[in-house]
Amino acid sequence: MIANVACAALMGIDAFKVELEVDFSRSGMPAFTMVGLAEGAVRESKERVFSALKNCGFKVPPARITVNLAPADVRKEGSAYDLPLAVGILCAMGVIPWGAAEGWYMAGELSLTGELKPVSGVLPLALAARAGKGRGIVVPAANGREGAVVKDIPVIGATDLGQVVRMLLGEESVEPAAVDIDTLWAERRTFLSDFAEVKGQEHAKRAIEIAAAGGHNLLFIGPPGSGKTMLAKRIPTVLPPLLFEEALEVTKIYSVAGQLPDGQALMVTRPFRTPHHTISDVGLIGGGRYPQPGETSLAHRGVLFLDEMPEFKKSVLEVLRQPLEDGEVTISRSLVSLRYPADIMLVAAMNPCPCGYLTDDTHPCQCSPLAVQRYRSRISGPLLDRIDLQVEVPAVPYDDLKQTRGDIDSATMRARIIAARAIQTARYADQPIALNSELTGSALEDWCRLGDTEHAFLKKAVESLGLSARAYVRILRISRTIADLDGADWIGPAHLAEAINYRSMDRQG
């Protein structure tokens, strides 16, 4: 007898349907064969499943069992196939009636006692089941709330294999998991830090406001102790809240990577990732033998902060060029090409020289011009061009340090940023872009149109600073954001001047 059970495999951050077929034959020599490009954890599922069936009271007689995972030309990996395999065997044995499991998508890892353990990728599975018009999905109880974020499809969170069988036999009723989206938004964590705690550095705060309003990348350059890291860590306090569609995207990435916090159904705050400078290129952008999202994708719709940027391996930094330009990571293998979203705001910090005190009047710099040049050359010109704002962060003078609080708090900055983003949302409503940082081609020409005075001003700056074509585009995008923060319809000389002032590395070159 042949039984079919629906499950799913992951391709990037999306899931596609997999038909698990079980042929249970009492004729011939007893054997167990699994085909369909099953990888290590899937092949090992035989031992877990047979032990779980035995310990749940189901006796599997000697038989020739053949399992096929279709489509057979796509690799299957992970332990989520344990539950559908166990149910498939029981259906093929006749323990579960024909058709009882039809339409149900299943995923879950089995312990030897039959307990269901959580697995990754449940949110994409629920979306695939809804798209495939399934009856519902059956997952471990620990994954129930994650799957329940998807509406219009019941999500059953089961504790063990026996409960799943009883549900399919109609002997036990299991209430679908439920999640109140409004409650999830209310669970957004309250930030314990605020820009009001940052004394001085008004120029850097203004740069952060511009970067957050237009989705621009940002580089801080300054001596040790000037507050670069402190400023960066407070950026999440001024970013607009995630939209539901954005939260779904972020949650899918964390679900696939197995990094969704326990008990959390939806990522409701923007990510802030701070990888160590010893990270590999695979760790940063993703990949590996079994491809997984990297730190860049885990920062999707949020902030990727690279502290002490020149200390990162140059080969690691260079892999950021494509994600910064395209907003996604492409991982190509001989059999498959995967894409992970990586729409990030890159924030980086660096010292001006190896010793850190080149721009500090109170500490003598010990570095030779050659050492400074070598240090800065660790960040390539093409990568620097992709960082819109390059801001000097000087040491804080004593008069600023003795203040009790800064002049501006996060709430005020966030209100201005949200207002600027609302202008951009209305402007680009009928275009495939959302923020000024995405302007290119004809859209850049339409919305960053300059008059004769502005053209003359910018021409002089480009020629005197030797700016590249990419830097020219960056200046226009920054100017557009500054104009939006000012509520101006068009870019003026003052906006261009401020934008050029945020290209610190160009002005020093």
Image (cartoon, rainbow, N blue to C red):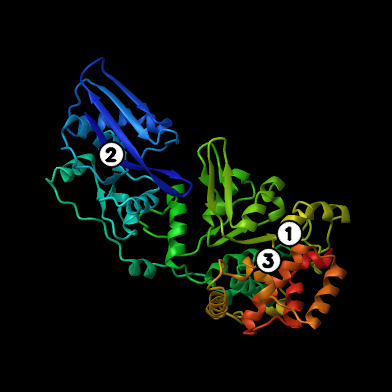
Residue identified by numbered label 1? 384
Where disc 3 sits, the SS reads helix
Say what amino acid the circle numbered 3 marks. Answer: Gly
Nearer to us in this view, 279 or 333: 333
Say what amino acid the circle numbered 2 marks. Answer: Val
Q: Residues within 10 Å of mark 3 (few under 14, many from 20)?
A: few
Residue identified by numbered label 3? 441
Q: Looking at the image, is mark 1 or mark 2 earlier in the sequence?
A: 2
177 left or right of 75 in image: left
Q: CA distance from mark 1 to mark 3?
A: 21 Å
Point out the residue furthest to the left here: 171
Nearer to us in this view, 481 or 211: 481
- Between disc 1 and disc 3, the foreground one is 3
Q: How many marks?
A: 3
Residue identified by numbered label 2? 5
Circle 3/circle 2 CB separation < 8 Å: no
Q: Looking at the image, is mark 3 or mark 2 earlier in the sequence?
A: 2
Circle 1/circle 3 CB separation < 8 Å: no
**Residue depicted at 26% across the width and 40% down the height:** 115
Residue 131 image position (x, y, % from top left): 35, 53
Residue 70 image position (x, y, % from top left): 37, 35
